[in-house]
Each structure stands twice: as C-alpha cells, then as structure tokens.
Amino acid sequence: MRAIFNAPDRTEADRLWREALTQWRKDHPKLVQWAEAAIPDSLTVFDFPAEHRVRLRTTNGLERINRELRRRTRVAGIFPNPESCLRLVSALLAEPDDEWMTGKVYLNLNP
C-alpha cells in the first residue's frame, strides 16, 4: 500500500494498485473487495500538486493535535461538567488555529 501512495504519479499508482489486487485476489478476497471500493477515492490525492500530497494523504497534523489534547486533559483529570471540558478543549484548539492563520502556511494554494 505504501508503494501505491508513494508513486510519482497517478498512472504509476493505478498500475501498482492493479498489480496488488492481482496478487491478493486468490488469498484475500475480502481485502480485494474492500480495496476495489476504497482505494480509487483515496487516489484522488494525485490530482493535487506533488508538494501537497504528503500533507493531504497523512493524518500527522491531526494526530499531533489529538496527542496534545489528550496530554492536557489528563492533567485536568475529572471535569465537573461538559462545559468545562469544552472550554479547555476550545482554548487548546484556538492556539494551533492562530498559528495557522498568522504563521507557517500548511498548504500554499497560490502559486
């Protein structure tokens, strides 16, 4: 799967995907059924410029934010009510939002 998404272009990714399906068809029919339904939608990442693909096909940024939320909410322990949890999480999410709005450009869509 990694080779498919690391392919240099859509043509090569399609070739590698068809090759993988051929190899899996006999031993893993359920996997092939899933892949035939799911992978074509995932390959739309190749419609974007090459420098955007890595950021679009991974969840690294989201995982980093989730780790930070988990770390900070563990310190608080038990919240007295849902609103207090929402206030803390909202405050924590406002920080990366401000950084994205004023700082580093995550995806530059203007050439």
Image (tube, rainbow, N blue to C red):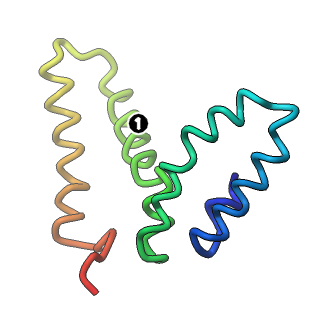
Q: Which residue is mark 1?
A: 71
User: What x and y, as percent, mark residue 102?
Assistant: 17, 70
Depicted 63 relative to depicted 103: above or below: above
Q: Judge from the rendering whether residue 7 lies leftward or rightward of residue 89; answer left or right.
A: right
User: What x and y, as percent, mark residue 16?
Assistant: 73, 60
Q: Judge from the rendering whether residue 23 lies leftward or rightward of residue 9; answer left or right.
A: right
Residue plotted at (75% across, 46% down): 21
Residue plotted at (64% across, 61% down): 14
- Specify the amino acid type for callout 1: Arg
Where the C terminus falls, by quadrant? bottom left
Secondary structure of residue under mark 1: helix
Location of residue 98 by image quarter: bottom left
Depicted 94 relative to depicted 80: above or below: below
User: Total number of numbered labels?
Assistant: 1
Depicted 5 relative to depicted 52: above or below: above
User: What x and y, as percent, mark residue 49?
Assistant: 43, 76
Residue plotted at (64% across, 64% down): 13
Residue plotted at (71% across, 61% down): 3
Q: Nearer the viewer, residue 91 or 6?
A: 6
User: What x and y, as percent, mark residue 83?
Assistant: 12, 21
